[in-house]
Image (cartoon, rainbow, N blue to C red):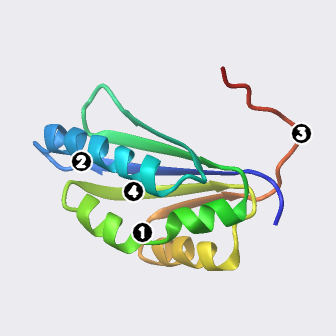
Amino acid sequence: MAGPIVFISRNRVKEGRLADWRVALAAGAAALRAEKPLTAAFLPYVADNGRDQTIVHVFADADAFDRHLEGVEDRSREAYELIDPVAFEVYGRPSDEAMSVFRAAAAAGRGLRLEPESLPGFLRLG
């Protein structure tokens, strides 16, 4: 499975919980940075309304994405006390195991967008 993976999660911050979510994100980002060295990017954003929230994740390949997903059940359980997941987007070709997580989310009523074919492009940092 070659090629980069971009994973986007769209969430809604629970009423009155944005300050708590900011604290949780800061701690979560620090933990992911330390514990998930193959996660190339973890970039959270929040809309002006303070409720709509998006996290962009970037991985070099499907294996890096799989490593990131290890322990996702525990991280999600904690996060879902502060946010409600709305939809997921997966760009690239993750493993079948990773896709089973997102297909289950779609079956539970969350939106799922898949675009598996990576076309020529680039990412320039620094």
- Image quarter where the N terminus lies is bottom right
The answer to whether marks 2 and 1 mark residues whose Cβ atoms lie closer than 8 Å is: no
Residue located beneath label 4 in the image = 86
Q: CA distance from mark 3 to mark 2?
A: 36 Å
Which amino acid type is shown beneath numbered disc 1? Val
Q: Is residue 80 above or below residue 91?
A: below
> Which corner quadrant of the image does residue 98 belong to?
bottom right
What amino acid is found at the position of numbered circle 3 in the picture?
A: Pro
Disc with the residue nearer the chain's start (3 vs 4)? 4
Q: Which of label 3 and label 1 is nearer to you?
A: 1
Q: Residue 83's spot in the image, x, y percent?
A: 26, 54
**What is the tally of numbered marks visible in this picture?**
4
Among numbered discs 1 and 4, the one appearing first in the sequence: 1
Q: Look at 50% across and 78% down and name the residue there.
A: 104
Q: CA distance from mark 2 to mark 1?
A: 15 Å
Q: Which residue is mark 2?
A: 24
Would you say 27 lies left or right of 4 here? left
Q: Nearer the viewer, residue 49 or 97?
A: 97
From the viewer's side, name the closer residue of 21 and 28.
28
Q: Tag 2 or tag 3, which sits nearer the N-term?
A: 2
Type of the residue with mark 4: Val
> Which residue is located at x 37 percent, y 73 percent?
73
Locate the C terminus by quadrant: top right
